[in-house]
Structures are given as structure tokens and as C-alpha cells.
Image: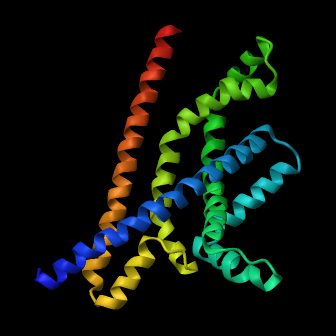
């Protein structure tokens, strides 16, 4: 590696990492939070079989799972102004990532809810709980424990998918890298560098996932011993 290339990589590392910490991570955290709210609501509606709303949830999931994320970004950011709705790049990315990820997570949570034995719901009724109390105190905690690994994988995938936000002018890590490449003409080294930074973020989340799964296993073991 020549001195010029080493200097470029050293200088660009912090220029790429900073938007990763100030844009990529906040975008992921905000969008995934909203996605989980959407997912839990959609999963509970489907689990309860609420007529009308259930079909609406199925339609939403069908649309957002069946169309590319990049197309959804373009429709919201470039297409909506044609009908008089203009959204800034970062909020547009949050909206699209939330809706897209919410559709996938809704199916994860729904499957986890259906994996809880039906007797758990009946047991809640027997001790005088309402449907909502039973769902909140008994069914949902067990379902979320089951769904945790899959939801964690979705979060890690979202970190990498945020690179697509560069296509709607969000100044995140990948867009910054593209600008540096255009100035330095070192695409191979710089794209490998940004890839390694994404890998660093994903590795940190993977470690947190492992710690979370270990904690859940210990809690389950304590609960089983108590029973």
C-alpha cells in the first residue's frame, strides 16, 4: 500500500465513521423503533382476527414485502412531490424503513404469538384477567422472547440497508464514501473500508444479540425452576 493511499484511507475513516454515528445509527434506531410499534400492532390485530383491520394489515404486509425497498424510497421521496407532498430526505427514509421493516417484523411477531400454547390465554381468563391484560402480561412477553433472535437479525439487516438512503440524498456513510471516491479515484480501497465499518457495526449488534439471548435463556431457566 503506497503512502498516498494510506493517507486517503486514514483521513477518510473518520469522515465516513462520523456520519455513521450521527446519521446511520440514529436512522436505524428511530426507524426500527417505529417498525416494532407497527409490527406489534399489526401482529396483535391479526392474532385477534379483527375483521376488516386484519385484511388491512395483510394488504399492508403484502405490499411492503412484495416491492423493493429502493422503489419504496423513490416513490416517497421523488414521487410524492408530484401530488404536492414533499418530505425531507431523513424523515422520508425513516418513514420508508419503518413501514418496510414493520411489515417483515409483523410476520415474525405474529408467528411468535401463534407459537404460545392456547392454554396460556385460557389461564389468563381463569385468574380474572381481561383479553388485553392477558396479552400484555402473559402472551406477548413469551412471544417476544421467541421472536427476539429473528428481530435482532432484522435490526442488523436494517443497519446495512440504510446504505440505500444515499439514493434519496441522505448523507450517511455510503454517500460520504461515494463523494470521497469521486474526489480520490480509489473505489476499491474506499468501498472495502466502508464495508468494514458496516461490519464493525453489525458485529457490535451481534454481540448485543448474543448477550440478550443469554439473558433470556437464564430468565427462562429461573422461571422453569420456579414452576
Q: Is residue 209 above or below residue 55?
A: above
Q: Which residue lies furthest to the left in this view?
A: 2
Residue 208 percent across, percent down from the top left: 39, 42
Residue 70 percent across, percent down from the top left: 58, 75
Which residue: 77% across, 60% down? 59
Q: Is residue 160 above or below residue 70?
A: above
- Which of the image's four quarters has the N terminus? bottom left
Judged left or right of residue 143, residue 12 is left
Q: Residue furthest right?
A: 52
Judged left or right of residue 121, residue 94 is left
Judged left or right of residue 128, residue 71 is left
Judged left or right of residue 103, residue 175 is left
Which residue: 45% across, 78% down? 175
Q: In this view, does 88 lie above or below 202?
A: below
Which residue: 49% across, 66% down? 161
Count the marks: how many? Answer: 0
Residue 163 percent across, percent down from the top left: 47, 71
Residue 164 percent across, percent down from the top left: 51, 73
**93 or 10: nearer the eye?**
10
Q: In this view, does 194 lie above or below 58?
A: below
**19 or 82: nearer the eye?**
19
Amino acid at each position: 500500500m503506497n503512502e498516498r493511499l494510506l493517507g486517503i484511507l486514514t483521513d477518510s475513516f473518520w469522515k465516513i465513521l462520523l456520519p455513521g454515528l450521527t446519521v446511520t445509527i440514529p436512522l436505524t434506531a428511530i426507524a426500527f423503533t417505529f417498525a416494532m410499534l407497527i409490527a406489534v400492532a399489526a401482529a396483535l390485530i391479526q392474532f385477534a382476527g379483527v375483521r376488516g383491520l386484519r385484511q388491512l394489515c395483510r394488504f399492508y404486509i403484502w405490499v411492503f414485502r412484495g416491492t423493493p425497498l429502493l422503489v419504496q424510497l423513490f416513490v416517497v421521496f421523488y414521487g410524492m412531490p408530484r401530488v404536492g407532498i414533499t418530505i425531507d430526505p431523513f424523515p422520508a427514509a425513516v418513514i420508508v424503513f419503518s413501514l418496510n421493516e414493520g411489515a417483515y417484523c409483523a410476520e415474525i411477531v405474529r408467528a411468535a404469538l401463534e407459537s404460545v400454547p392456547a392454554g396460556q390465554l385460557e389461564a389468563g381468563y381463569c385468574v380474572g384477567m381481561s383479553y388485553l391484560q392477558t396479552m400484555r402480561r402473559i402472551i406477548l412477553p413469551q412471544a417476544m422472547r421467541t421472536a427476539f433472535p429473528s428481530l435482532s437479525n432484522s435490526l442488523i439487516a436494517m443497519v446495512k440497508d440504510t446504505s440505500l438512503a444515499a439514493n434519496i440524498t441522505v448523507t450517511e456513510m455510503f454517500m460520504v464514501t461515494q463523494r470521497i471516491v469521486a474526489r480520490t479515484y480509489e473505489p476499491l480501497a474506499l468501498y472495502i473500508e466502508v464495508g468494514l465499518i458496516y461490519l464493525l457495526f453489525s458485529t457490535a449488534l451481534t454481540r448485543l444479540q448474543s448477550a440478550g439471548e443469554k439473558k433470556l435463556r437464564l430468565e427462562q431457566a429461573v422461571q422453569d425452576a420456579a414452576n
